[in-house]
Amino acid sequence: MEKTTRRNLLKVAAASGVSAALGAATKTEARGEQRSVPGETQGHDHHDMSMVGTHQPGPVAVSARQQSLTRMVATFPGATVSFGFFPADSTVDRMQNAAPGNRNGHAMIPNQITIRVGGMVNFIIQGNHQIVVYDDGIQPQNINPDLLLPAPLNNLIDDPNGRIYRGLSPTAVPASFFGPNNPPAIIPAAPPDRIEAVSFPRVGVYLVICAVRGHFLQGMYGYVIVVP
């Protein structure tokens, strides 16, 4: 009787040990999965840069995904903007015509983005465009589209009031354009397909226009909102 009882106790103890081991393994696995979820979420969010550029954390309690995005904005305080574009249709063959201006879309997309102070915007330029950034508070109606550069750049707006950044010229510039003491060379036009990275070190709302007069009058402008 005593041997039987002891044998049963050993069986129970062994079974309890297996259960405990399984329980510990299950908890370890669960903890591992819990740790992996934020990593996977951040990995997916890391590729969703359009959301990073436009996200603003709310003033009240936010979801776990919003908290993750907020951390990402703090880490990657930038955004990407398309400045001009070409449609995918049978009328565009850039192998035959690298710059078919009549098929170029004159728009800044998105036309309003939000970044952290000190962050940058990568303007992906497609076509005959020039980026000009104006200081906080300047509005499109404050721009004088009749203030133009002299020929041969007389299609570009040259309103200096509040201008804080002027990008590459889409038109070749003679060296003499800037004065007779410059080297006798031509500053070539910028390539129509390029990226200009512009940083914003101060909080504010900044107007970004295409300085090509016709494009600006067609509404090619937008805003970069810089938050703390």
Image (spheres, rainbow, N blue to C red):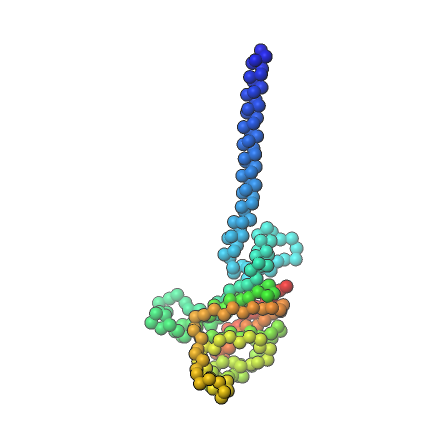
**Where in the figure is residue 123, as x and y percent of width and height?**
50, 68
Which residue is found at the position 58% from the left and 19% from the top? Answer: 9
Image location of residue 26, percent across then percent down:
54, 36
- Residue at 43 percent of width and 70 percent of height: 193
In this picture, residue 121 sits left or right of residue 227 = left
- Image point 57% across, 62% down: which residue? 77
Q: Is residue 171 left or right of residue 201?
A: left
**Left or right: 77 as drawn, with respect to 174:** right
Taking the image as shown, residue 48 lies to the left or right of residue 191, namely right
Q: Nearer the viewer, residue 122 or 91?
A: 122
Q: Quadrant of residue 206?
A: bottom right
Image location (x, y in percent) of residue 183: 46, 84
Q: Position of residue 220 (x, y in %)?
A: 50, 73
Above or below residue 193? Residue 37 is above
Which of 103 and 56 lies nearest the eye of the viewer? 56
Q: Assign the C terminus to one quadrant of the image.
A: bottom right
